[in-house]
Amino acid sequence: MAKKNKNMALSHILETIGKNPLRPPAALFSGGISSEVPFFPEDILVWKSSSEQTVTDVSIHQRMILKIILSGDVVTSVDGLRIPMKASDMILFFPFQFHSTRLLCAPQEYSFLAITFTERTRNYASMLPLKNHLLSPDREDARNIACLIRSSLRRERCVPEKAVLALMDLLFAQRRKVLRKESPGRAAATVPGETADRISDYFRSHFNQRISLKTVAAEFGCSEETIRRMFHRSYGEITPGRLIRRLRMQFAVEMLEHTREPISRIAEQCGYSDTFVFSKAFRRLTGVSPQQHRKAYFASVGGKNGRHFPPS
């Protein structure tokens, strides 16, 4: 049986080659095949919401989370953007993103599937095109999701490696779809035209500047109290101040993990004039100092691939 399978495999290989020459290359370092999106998910967990877990306050995680609505209608808020979602819609949350859910249906009518994971080197840059986008699975995506579920349930001899490949295929397929659809001005069209959302978008574009509620109020021609009320009505616990701090810290984490920039320079690029104030805010949110976070991150990365310092 093994010999028959080998012969079938060889026949398939020869058929694929066909009459193509496939000549040896002139040099072994020219024109090879490589991936433009190096990304390897690990520590994948799959779970379904229960009646006690359907509604949450503002959440923040250090893992990637692919959330798939199974039933019900909701509005998902992420980084100040409000995204209406219905059954079969998906969204990918990145580490350290603010996100919350507002139900548009009865609690018992709402359920979702969560696929959470990390990336081997904690480098999520290749997935950034999916950030804050509403995603929709097609039939092939559904097959990959089913593979992940079966693997999590340890059914049908679905080996872990197959589940990892299924998640990679799912994410890359969504990435290709988003990149094909994106065009100038499209991102602005996804943001509702309400004042609170426009202000949130302003924060997202200017968080690394020394802005204050007073300067933003002047920019939009309204009072500081009006902005506070609009945020409370639209986003609940996400105040303007919390949104700015969260955006700054999210950017700080990316700078700490993927650049050699000194802490003082990162503080400046995050909109802080004082490194001590920046470090205190970072510790309050993460529990460690910026330097400790960078050291722990590269120690974990170095243990896996031999790299001990941020990339140049």
Image (spheres, rainbow, N blue to C red):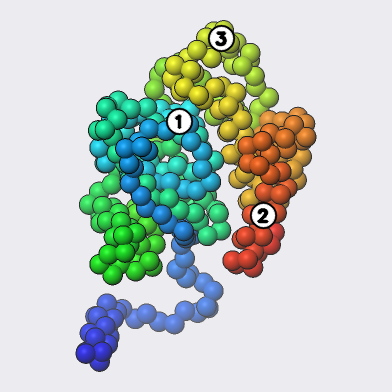
CA–CA distance in space, label 3 to label 1: 23 Å
Question: Of 61 and 167, which appears nearest the observer?
Answer: 61
Q: Find residue 222 and report its horizontal and vertical position in percent.
A: 54, 8
Q: Find residue 126 and report its horizontal and vertical position in percent.
A: 49, 51
- Residue on which the image places disc 3: 225
Judged left or right of residue 121, residue 157 is left
- Residue on which the image places disc 2: 296
Q: Is residue 87 above or below residue 47?
A: above
**What is the three-letter code of the residue carrying label 2?**
Ala
- Residue on which the image places disc 1: 57
- Residue 54's quadrant in the figure? top left
> Residue placed at 77% from the left, 31% from the top?
274
Question: Of 202 and 157, which appears nearest the observer?
Answer: 157
Residue furthest to the bottom in view is 3
> Residue placed at 65% from the left, 22% from the top?
211
Observer-side mark, 2 or 1, equals 1
**What is the three-letter code of the residue carrying label 3?**
Glu
Residue 172 visible? The answer is no
Q: Is residue 228 above or below residue 69?
A: above
> Residue placed at 64% from the left, 54% from the top?
297
**What is the three-letter code of the residue carrying label 1?**
Asp
